[in-house]
Image: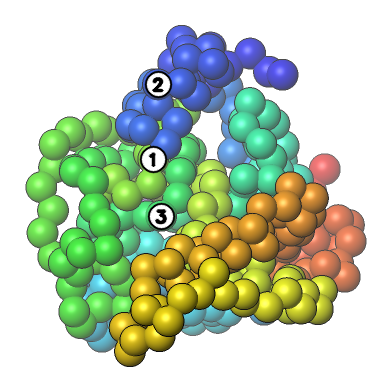
């Protein structure tokens, strides 16, 4: 395991996991001071022209407030953008750029299967995706330029959101803390903490995100697996007596249904096999047939297109 002292601001992996992971934010100055970014903003824009690459543009003052446009884009898209107030998001940069994939080695104190992807966010001055919260843990690594991060309180599904936006933007955001991040600095955020990161200069931020599926989605997927396996156990009554024949469902039926459902999933082998499959299901199934070389070729193709020198 890599030494985490620099990456976690002097904390050991054990301390970080016990005190911060999924609990509270942590700002780390100079977390990765020597890491050099392998992807220039032009190359990122180049990737967003590709069909296989998931990309979005967010314009604070677009056709609607916080307008979202989905890639693939064309070169003219970028030529027509305003000078300020927009952000380009490129998903799963680790799939396309081996050096970005190797960045993940620094996070080997966390289970790799919890990792979702590395998203790149390039913003011009004033660019942001608005005040919001996420359902996942994320390390926000400042790669180039400066971004001002504000964080507020914790949210949940009752927190009011802007009605007329494509994004889940908070109606009200009150900053409790604020930091200006420089290249190499990193901010860890647990799920549900409201945050707002605004570019002070042209800036590039990587979001190293960890997937946290909802329990309902997990249950739905597990149910699908049980259906496929042809599970045929049926509901069985508790010991009946005639007083239980009324129109109201007696609490003993509820207890019995609960008991039987819990027994159905109380199976370490079943849940273990299912969890392994569920948590490692590839996010981009279409890319499964591409080899590492082919993915790299997509990125390298962009280098040629942007006239970069290859050595
Ligand atoms: Mn976020």
Q: Residues within 10 Å of mark 1 (few under 14, many from 20)?
A: many
Determine whether label 3 and label 2 are within 8 Å by CB: no
Which of the two residues, 253 or 288, is positioned nearer the viewer here? Answer: 253
Q: Residue at x 38, y 39 (%)?
A: 189
Q: Residue at x 13, y 36 (%)?
A: 176
Whole-number angstrom distance, CA of label 3 to CA of label 2: 19 Å
Q: Is residue 307 above or below residue 164?
A: above
Q: Residues within 10 Å of mark 2 (few under 14, many from 20)?
A: few
Q: Position of residue 253 (x, y in %)?
A: 46, 72
Which of the two residues, 302 or 139, is positioned nearer the viewer here? Answer: 139
Q: Position of residue 198 (x, y in %)?
A: 26, 50
First-in-chain label (3 vs 2): 2
Residue on which the image places disc 3: 135
Task: Determine whether the beta carbon of the residue marked 1 sits less than 8 angstroms from the nearest atom of ligand 1.
Answer: no
Q: Is residue 195 visible?
A: no
Which of the two residues, 123 or 141, is positioned nearer the viewer here? Answer: 141
| Mark 1 residue element | loop
Whole-number angstrom distance, CA of label 1 to CA of label 3: 8 Å
Q: Quadrant of the C terminus?
A: top right
Residue on which the image places disc 1: 190
Q: How is the image coloured?
A: rainbow
Left or right side of 155 for 286: right
Q: Residues within 10 Å of mark 3 (few under 14, many from 20)?
A: some
Image quadrant assignment for residue 79: bottom left
Q: Position of residue 214 (x, y in %)?
A: 48, 61
Left or right side of 143 for 289: right
């Amino acid at each position: 395991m890599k030494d985490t002292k620099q990456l976690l601001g002097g904390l050991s992996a054990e301390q970080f996991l016990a005190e911060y992971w999924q609990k509270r934010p942590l700002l780390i100055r100079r977390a990765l001071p020597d890491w050099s970014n392998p992807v220039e903003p032009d190359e990122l824009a180049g990737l967003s022209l590709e069909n296989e690459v998931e990309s979005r543009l967010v314009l604070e003052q677009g056709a609607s407030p916080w307008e979202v446009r989905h890639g693939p884009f064309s070169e003219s898209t970028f030529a027509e953008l305003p000078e300020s107030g927009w952000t380009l998001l490129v998903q799963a940069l680790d799939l396309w750029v081996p050096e970005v994939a190797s960045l993940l080695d620094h996070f080997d104190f966390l289970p790799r299967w919890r990792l979702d992807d590395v998203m790149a966010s390039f913003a011009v001055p004033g660019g942001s995706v608005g005040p919001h919260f996420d359902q996942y843990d994320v390390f926000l690594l400042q790669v180039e330029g400066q971004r001002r991060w504000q964080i507020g309180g914790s949210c949940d599904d009752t927190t009011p959101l802007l009605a007329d936006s494509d994004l889940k933007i908070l109606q009200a955001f009150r900053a409790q803390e604020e930091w200006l991040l420089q290249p190499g600095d990193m901010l860890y955020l647990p799920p549900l903490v409201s945050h707002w990161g605004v570019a002070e200069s042209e800036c590039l931020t990587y979001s190293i995100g960890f997937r946290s599926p909802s329990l309902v989605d997990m249950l739905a997927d597990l149910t699908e697996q049980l259906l496929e396996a042809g599970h045929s156990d049926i509901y069985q009554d508790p010991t009946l007596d005639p007083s239980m024949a009324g129109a109201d469902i007696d609490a003993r039926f509820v207890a019995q249904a609960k008991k039987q459902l819990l027994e159905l999933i109380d199976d370490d082998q079943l849940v273990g096999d299912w969890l392994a499959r569920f948590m490692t299901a590839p996010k981009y199934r279409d890319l499964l047939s591409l080899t590492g070389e082919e993915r790299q070729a997509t990125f390298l193709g962009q280098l040629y297109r942007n006239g970069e020198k290859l050595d």
